């Protein structure tokens, strides 16, 4: 059975959250040359048609799956929010499973993901939680089903791997936004509306630099336009020399991360630079740097990132509320975007097509 009717709440109410350090779970990828970094990108990377899925409408069926970590009781609020959009929310058959720090075995998590993409009645796929695990199953993704029936896909953090694979394999626009395992302190009415607009309307998304964000200290003046691609910095770095790292030539690179030290930001960006992945980017949009430890007398995360990106010769805009921090906003990945450091804005073209009702 591919899915079950989803009730608000978790089975038995006894699913517990588990805080996992991704750094302890994901081994740093081996250094790769520029040729290897680009090898996974299609030869026609700049010319293939970009696919925007149909906008979700009230009454559409959507599926919640857990390709990575185990969801907890906060899943109930995320379900209520999606239902508040008028969507009919279903659960993957193994949504409530646990296998160590993973939401079920690799086989079961992959089966749920492929069932969601393979069901023609499902119009949207929402990730329950991040953490770690998507890399373990991504090579089994049913790409024929993805290409046959494109649909809205929402997730962030560990789901950067899925977004990258969808882009490389199908040029499918996805959405870098909150998991269904919704966090009250991070997501209020404005953030709920940001998600709704991104997946249910064809309005552009405009984000303004928030000077209170630690990443707001990173800046290189200028204006740049390109397709917004990227996501979580850890996942981008560990995707080097795989089919999950997008070809970033001409792109606006989006990065954000959490629980990483200044030297970790330095190391990850240095790896991407040495691998040639950032060689011809158009600009960089920087989301949130949350829970970055600060050591007296040493660089902050923002200072380390400024040092690494400042010499690339492209505009850089920090302070965007995208990522793991309070006030998380939703942006499409794969549509054209413009960063304007003078206006302190990131403007992203819509990621869905509004299809007239039959």
Image: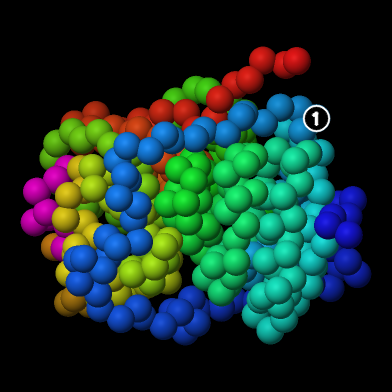
Query: Which of these two is toward me, 142 or 62?
Result: 142
The image position of residue 88, as x and y in percent, is 81, 39
- Quadrant in which residue 150 is drawn: top right
Seen at 33% across and 68% down, the residue is 240
Seen at 68% across and 84% down, the residue is 100
Give left or right: position of 158 versus 343: right
Q: What residue range appears in magenta?
A: 308-317
Does the magenta-highlighted stretch encompass residue 311?
Answer: yes
Quarter of the N terminus within the rendering: bottom right
The image position of residue 134, as x and y in percent, is 56, 67
Query: Which of these two is toward me, 306 or 231?
Result: 231
The image position of residue 224, as x and y in percent, is 21, 35
User: Would you place residue 80 above or below residue 190 in this image?
Assistant: below
User: Would you place residue 250 above or below residue 310 in this image?
Assistant: above
Does the magenta-highlighted stretch encompass residue 332?
Answer: no
- Looking at the rendered structure, the secondary structure element under dot 1 is loop
User: Would you place residue 231 above or below residue 206 in this image?
Assistant: below
Answer whether residue 286 is visible to the viewer in this image.
no
The image position of residue 90, as x and y in percent, is 81, 49
Query: Which of these two is toward me, 190 or 322?
Result: 322
Q: Which residue is mark 1?
A: 59
Seen at 39% across and 68% down, the residue is 242
Quarter of the C terminus within the rendering: top right
Give left or right: position of 85 versus 52: right
Question: What secondary structure is the stretch in magenta mostly built from?
Answer: loop
Label 1, residues with CA under 10 Å away: few <14, some 14-19, many ≥20: few
Query: Which of these two is toward me, 258 or 134?
Result: 134
């Amino acid at each position: 059975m591919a899915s079950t009717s989803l009730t608000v709440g978790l089975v038995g109410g006894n699913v517990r959250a588990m805080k996992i350090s991704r750094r302890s779970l994901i081994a740093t990828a081996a250094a790769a040359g520029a040729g290897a970094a680009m090898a996974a990108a299609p030869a026609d990377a700049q010319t293939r048609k970009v696919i925007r899925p149909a906008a979700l409408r009230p009454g559409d069926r959507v599926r919640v799956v857990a390709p990575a970590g185990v969801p907890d009781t906060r899943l109930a609020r995320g379900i209520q929010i999606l239902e508040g959009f008028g969507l009919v929310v279903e659960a993957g058959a193994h949504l409530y499973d646990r296998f160590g720090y993973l939401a079920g075995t690799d086989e079961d998590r992959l089966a749920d993901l492929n069932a969601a993409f393979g069901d023609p009645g499902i119009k949207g796929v929402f990730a329950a939680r991040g953490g770690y695990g998507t890399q373990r199953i991504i090579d089994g993704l049913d790409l024929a089903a993805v290409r046959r029936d494109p649909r809205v896909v929402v997730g962030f953090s560990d789901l950067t791997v899925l977004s990258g694979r969808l882009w490389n394999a199908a040029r499918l626009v996805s959405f870098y936004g909150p998991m269904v395992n919704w966090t009250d302190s991070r997501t209020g009415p404005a953030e709920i509306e940001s998600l709704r607009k991104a997946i249910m309307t064809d309005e552009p998304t405009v984000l303004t630099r928030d000077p209170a964000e630690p990443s707001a200290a990173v800046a290189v003046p200028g204006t740049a336009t390109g397709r917004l691609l990227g996501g979580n910095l850890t996942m981008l770095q560990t995707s080097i020399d795989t089919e999950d790292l997008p070809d970033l030539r001409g792109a606006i690179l989006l990065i954000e991360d959490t629980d990483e030290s200044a030297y970790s930001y330095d190391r990850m960006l240095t790896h991407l630079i040495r691998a040639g992945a950032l060689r011809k980017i158009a600009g960089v949009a920087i989301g949130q740097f949350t829970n970055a430890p600060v050591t007296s007398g040493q660089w902050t995360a923002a200072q380390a990132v400024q040092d690494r990106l400042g010499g690339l010769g492209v505009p850089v805009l920090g302070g965007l509320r995208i990522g793991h921090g309070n006030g998380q906003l939703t942006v499409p990945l794969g549509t054209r975007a413009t960063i304007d450091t003078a206006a302190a804005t990131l403007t992203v073209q819509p990621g869905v097509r509004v299809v007239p009702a039959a």
